[in-house]
Image (cartoon, grey):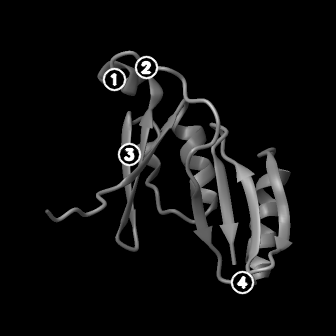
Amino acid sequence: MTVKLKRVGIYVAQMKRALDFYRKLGLAIPDNADEAHHVDVEQDGIVFAFDLVESVKRVFEGWDKPVGYRTELAFQFSSREALDDAYRQLTSLGHKGYLEPRDTPWGERYAIVKDPDDNLISFIA
């Protein structure tokens, strides 16, 4: 059997609000996607998908609101300074900082910001 990862998807309450956050991280998302129920964004061979919760509820039987943090979405920055700048920019716009930028024992610069749907988004440099 051969398996290939097709996409990574997240469920969002408001498409435009979510897409605006990820645009600030540099994802090329067209403006006309703001009103869609499903959006695929391909970057460097990875498809990142966004689905409205209201649409997902129609497909899944017995939808339960997820609780806790079960995945990590991590974005690689070109430098420590770029990571720090992105963290400052997003938190100054009102996005919740979860872990301020810091250097790790394994040599990476690391920070976490919550996206508009409270997913933990890791920044790495």
Q: Identify which amino acid the numbered label 3 is placed on.
A: Val
Residue at position x 76%, y 55% in the image: 90
Residue at mark 4: 79
**Distance between the alpha carbons at the discs numbered 3 and 2:** 21 Å
**Distance between the alpha carbons at the discs numbered 3 and 1:** 18 Å
Which one is in front in this view, the residue at disc 4 or the one at disc 3?
4
Residue at mark 3: 39
Residue positioned most to the top: 62
Crowding around mark 2 (Cα neighbors within 10 Å: few <14, some 14 to 19, many 20+) is few
Crowding around mark 4 (Cα neighbors within 10 Å: few <14, some 14 to 19, many 20+) is few
Which one is in front in this view, the residue at disc 3 or the one at disc 2?
2
**Distance between the alpha carbons at the discs numbered 2 and 1:** 6 Å
Find numbered disc 1 in the image and state the secondary structure of the residue it sits on. Answer: loop
Residue at mark 1: 60
Which one is in front in this view, the residue at disc 4 or the one at disc 1?
1
Q: Identify which amino acid the numbered label 2 is placed on.
A: Trp
Crowding around mark 3 (Cα neighbors within 10 Å: few <14, some 14 to 19, many 20+) is many
Which one is in front in this view, the residue at disc 3 or the one at disc 1?
1
Q: Are marks 3 and 2 in contact (CB under 8 Å)?
A: no
Residue at position x 43%, y 54% in the image: 30
Residue at mark 2: 63
Q: In this view, does 105 lie above or below 114?
A: below
Find numbered disc 2 in the image and state the secondary structure of the residue it sits on. Answer: loop
Q: Earlier in the sequence, mark 4 or mark 3?
A: 3
Front residue (pair 3, 97): 3
